[in-house]
């Protein structure tokens, strides 16, 4: 053991002024007997990390554009600057409208246009694409973008509406698959490459906003017979296909239907999931254990029901989910809206939610929520390409995960959601130190 090694500590705590604040290096343990331990063994390594990030929505883009130039730059740096901000590297964007758009819109609006002659991303050029390109400049490295549709065009659906569920009409499956190709090609022409696509956002939910229902068999057949072949034929076989893109509760059953068909499974990179409803963290592990060659990606999570200004539980929900998901082989974690207004919108059906950054009507420009700081304890210190390593906590009150970065550093995230301070002996291979975790706090320790 090497108690003299300096273990860096960054802290965020509710009852202090600490917000991603650098602390003195961990003190050596003169008498650590009886202390709960967090033990990290970098010799046991697991999944590689793709990255962390949030979603570029039309609502977020409009809010960002409404800020003055100085505040716009500050928001970009807070999220995307790899030195002064979170260094976000894996994000999501909606293909066509979602509830956090200013209204329904489709890229092929002309009914019956199976040739896609009317295909256009002109709407995206107004706000979405400027926001993404500005983020790319600040990030200084490629941002992997997952594109997700909330609904096909209304004329392709059984209910003739983008909202309220409905299904994709069978006769339009090939045309809809070709829309993905046109979308990816069009974004590439704008300097915005698409890293992956999901088949459908929340395919088991009929929502009063943009939504479309797919059974597991529908999704399997669409990937196998239409989406996979069309991407491949267009030379886009490297674009990752993500199935499910919904809650953890049914992810095992949905994955089973698709992955049990080799012809469909060969096109699929992995399973995406959200956090709404029951936690079901064990389902994430089950999908990995049954299909270890497929990836797991958290694709959306936010606190619903308004902005929740000042809520500390908001950040804790993020950290708890991230630790549990990452410890069960998840390779990336994508938050929902990057920027919302002070009411939690705009949202074209009034489904207001929280975000890590909210704009304000005052001269301050924007406000950082607790979720912003908690996300930073992961994104800033666990970089793309890092590998999760063995991390065991002996005490039930301390939740933890650990990663080895490509530069050789080890980052350990420790969460205390109790009202009591905790002293923890941290062991990283041969190094050790005692960490003081205040009540309702999160720390990232780096060696």
Image (spheres, grey):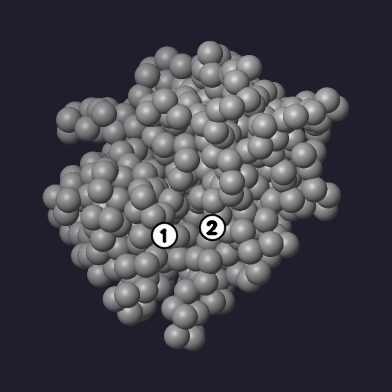
Of 17 and 66, nearer the camera is: 17
Q: Looking at the image, how many numbered discs can be counted on the residues? A: 2
Helix, strand or loop at label 2? It is: helix
Q: Quadrant of the N terminus?
A: top right
Q: Which of marks 1 and 2 precedes in the sequence?
A: 1
Residue located 45% across and 85% down the image:
363
Residue located 55% across and 33% down the image:
6
Of 348 and 151, nearer the camera is: 348
In the picture, the disc for residue 298 is none
Q: Which residue is mark 1?
A: 78
Residue 391 visible, this orientation: no
Query: Does 5 appear above or below 19?
Result: above
Q: Position of residue 179 (x, y in %)?
A: 26, 46
Residue located 35% across and 48% down the image:
82
Helix, strand or loop at label 1? It is: helix
**Separation (CA) of disc 2 from disc 1:** 9 Å
Query: Does 431 appear above or below 299?
Result: above
Q: Position of residue 426 (x, y in %)?
A: 67, 30
Crowd rating for badge 2 (residues with CA inside 10 Å; few <14, some 14–19, many 20+): many
Of 304 and 141, nearer the camera is: 141
* Badge 2 vs badge 1, beta-carbon distance below 8 Å: yes
Residue located 47% across and 60% down the image:
337
Q: Position of residue 180 (x, y in %)?
A: 28, 44
Q: Which residue is mark 2?
A: 372
Residue 404 visible, this orientation: yes
Q: Is residue 390 left or right of residue 277?
A: left
């Amino acid at each position: 053991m090497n108690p003299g090694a300096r273990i860096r500590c960054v802290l965020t705590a509710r009852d202090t002024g600490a917000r991603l604040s650098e602390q003195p290096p961990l003190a050596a343990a003169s008498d650590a007997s009886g202390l709960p331990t967090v033990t990290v063994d970098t010799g046991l390594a697991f999944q590689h990390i793709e990255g962390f990030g949030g979603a570029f929505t039309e609502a977020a883009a409009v809010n960002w554009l409404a800020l003055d130039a100085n505040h716009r730059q500050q928001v970009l740096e807070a999220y995307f600057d790899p030195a002064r901000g979170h260094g976000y590297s894996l994000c999501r964007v909606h293909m066509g409208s979602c509830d956090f758009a200013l209204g329904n819109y489709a890229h092929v609006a002309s009914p019956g246009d199976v040739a896609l002659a009317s295909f256009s991303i002109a709407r995206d050029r107004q706000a979405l694409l400027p926001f993404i390109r500005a983020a790319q400049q600040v990030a200084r490295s490629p941002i992997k973008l997952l594109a997700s549709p909330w609904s096909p065009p209304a004329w392709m659906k059984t209910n003739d509406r983008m909202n309220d569920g409905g299904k994709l009409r069978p006769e339009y499956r090939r045309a809809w698959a070709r829309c993905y190709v046109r979308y990816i090609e069009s974004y590439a022409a704008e300097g915005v490459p698409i890293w992956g696509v999901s088949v459908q956002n929340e395919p088991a939910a009929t929502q009063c906003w943009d939504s479309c229902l797919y059974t597991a068999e529908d999704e399997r057949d669409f990937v196998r017979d239409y989406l996979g072949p069309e991407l491949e034929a267009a030379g886009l076989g490297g674009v990752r296909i993500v199935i499910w893109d919904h809650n953890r509760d049914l992810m095992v059953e949905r994955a089973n239907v698709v992955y049990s068909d080799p012809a469909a499974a060969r096109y699929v990179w992995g399973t995406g999931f959200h956090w709404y409803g029951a936690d079901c963290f064990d389902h994430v592990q089950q999908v990995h254990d049954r299909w270890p060659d497929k990836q797991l990606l958290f694709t959306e999570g936010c606190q619903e029901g308004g902005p929740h200004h000042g809520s500390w539980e908001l950040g804790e929900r993020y950290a708890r989910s991230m630790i549990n998901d990452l410890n069960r082989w998840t390779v990336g974690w994508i938050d929902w809206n990057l920027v919302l207004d002070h009411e939690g919108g705009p949202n074209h059906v009034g489904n207001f939610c929280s975000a890590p950054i909210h704009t304000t009507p005052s001269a301050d420009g924007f406000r950082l929520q607790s979720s912003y700081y908690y996300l930073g304890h992961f994104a800033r210190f666990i970089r793309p390409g890092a590998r999760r390593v063995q991390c065991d906590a002996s005490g039930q009150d301390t939740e933890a995960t650990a990663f080895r970065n490509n530069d050789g550093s080890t980052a350990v995230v420790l969460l205390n959601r109790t009202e009591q301070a905790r002293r923890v002996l941290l062991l990283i291979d041969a190094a050790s130190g005692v960490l003081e975790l205040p009540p309702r706090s999160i720390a990232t320790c780096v060696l």
